[in-house]
Amino acid sequence: MPEIHSKLPPSSAHRWLVCTLSPQMEEPFPNTTSEAAEQGTAAHSMAEQKVKRLLKEPCEREPTDFDDEEMEEHTDNYRTFVLDQIQEAKQYTEDPLVMVEQRLSFEDIIPGGFGTADLIIATPKKLWITDLKYGKGVPVYVSQGLNPQLCIYAYGAYSNLKYLFPDVESVTMTIYQPRIGNIDSFEISIKELLEWAEEYVKPRAIEAAGPGGVLVPGDHCKFCKAKAVCRARAEEALRLAQERFTVITGSYETSQGEMPMYSFKSPASLSQEEIEDVLPLLNRISDWIDAVFTYVADEAISHGRKWKGYKVVEGRANRKYVSEKMVEAACKKAGYTNIYEQSLLPLTKLEKRLTKPIFKELLEDTGLVVKPKGKLTLTVEADTREAVDPERLTEETGKTRLSPEDVFKPVEG
Ligand code: SF4
């Protein structure tokens, strides 16, 4: 059955609720898929099957090329998480209603609005909505400001079930993002949810579905299909770059009169406060530059479009076997048998082969398998991972901790 897309899907509500012209801007661009999206679909179907088996419901599933041990492990853990949520729900009723991959309609607040919730658990007093996110690129939170996607699902679950459970008082929404260890929950009262849906979502959804709307650039542009050709976004990126990173160092004459000449500020001339101020904007500017280059390259390579000063060339390529089987056969026929090398199984495969208890006894307990510390990375404060103590950093790197005064010395002149 072909997949049907809503014009205002909950997954992009964070964008169309702010930039109400974005659905129209995105219309000319086809829906595309990616390996990450297909992997996410495979993980969802594996998780669905495991949860349905837990509920003793039938669920057929064809294996996919993306199925692997990591996915098995994460979806096993997801099933355990769902089981824990069902146990929690049993505090409210003996027999909670559990729905997996449930289609919901939100037409009363979003014209033509519908979507599919990964998991809903319903009791007479409380609902639970869980969204499995298999991506690991961008952490998604629900506890730091209202997450529009989850709130719309929560609204849909409440309004679709209110005839069965009219006295529900709250909904717990959870993002389950196992590949980066992010399990983030937030409870919202039905009163607050309904006010948000009626007063915030409904007027913006009506505007976004109609012929009007406004262009509002921001962080939500990141996954907009129109991001490379959107003038508002281009102007914002150029204005941000000009305001925050350049200084006027002179002027030059043009046919329209004297124009200011800009130069980029040296990072060494910026104070710590100025750098902290511009850090959140850097991604917006670099995302825009990436989007323009991706668009320009795709137009040139896929559609033969010419861009002045640029051309399409072939990259370097490495030799490769056409068919390993045919190469083996050809070598053996010619009398060459020394064509193989033996290597140890990858860790997870070896663990499966030996079984977990033996693997632990033989290799982990004897110190032959260790888990090194993760690579240190700078991330945003909102990231739910615990911050590393700065003292530990200086001990481990052996470098002295610098004070802002050490780093930001006044620039002469
Ligand atoms: S790129 Fe940004 S401003 Fe432009 S349409 Fe998309 S969301 Fe709106």
Image: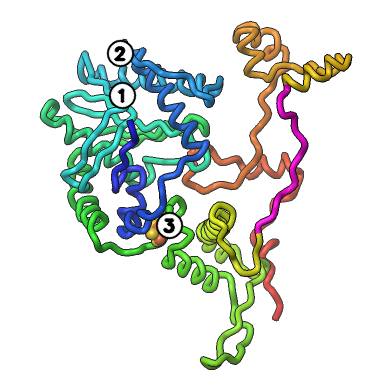
Q: Where is residue 131? Give x, y as percent.
A: 37, 33
Label for residue 231? none
Q: Quadrant of ligand 1?
A: bottom left
Q: Secondary structure at mark 1?
A: strand
Which residue bears the numbered disc 1?
Answer: 100
Give neighbour class at mark 1: few <14, some 14-19, many 20+ (Cα, 10 Å): some
**Contact between labelled residues 2 and 3, with CB atoms less than 8 Å apart:** no
**Contact between labelled residues 2 and 1, with CB atoms less than 8 Å apart:** yes
Give neighbour class at mark 2: few <14, some 14-19, many 20+ (Cα, 10 Å): few
Residue in the image at 22% along x and 39% along y? 155
Which residue bears the numbered disc 2?
Answer: 57
Counting residues from the N terminus, which is met first, the one under dot 3 or under dot 2? 2
Residue in the image at 34% along x and 36% along y? 3
Q: Is residue 154 above or below residue 288?
A: above
Q: Main secondary structure of the magenta part?
A: loop
Counting residues from the N terminus, which is met first, the one under dot 1 or under dot 2? 2
Quarter holding residue 170: top left
Q: Is residue 195 magenta?
A: no
Q: Secondary structure at mark 2?
A: loop
For this rendering, which residue is in front, 100 or 196? 100
Which residue bears the numbered disc 3?
Answer: 226
For this rendering, which residue is in front, 323 or 73? 323
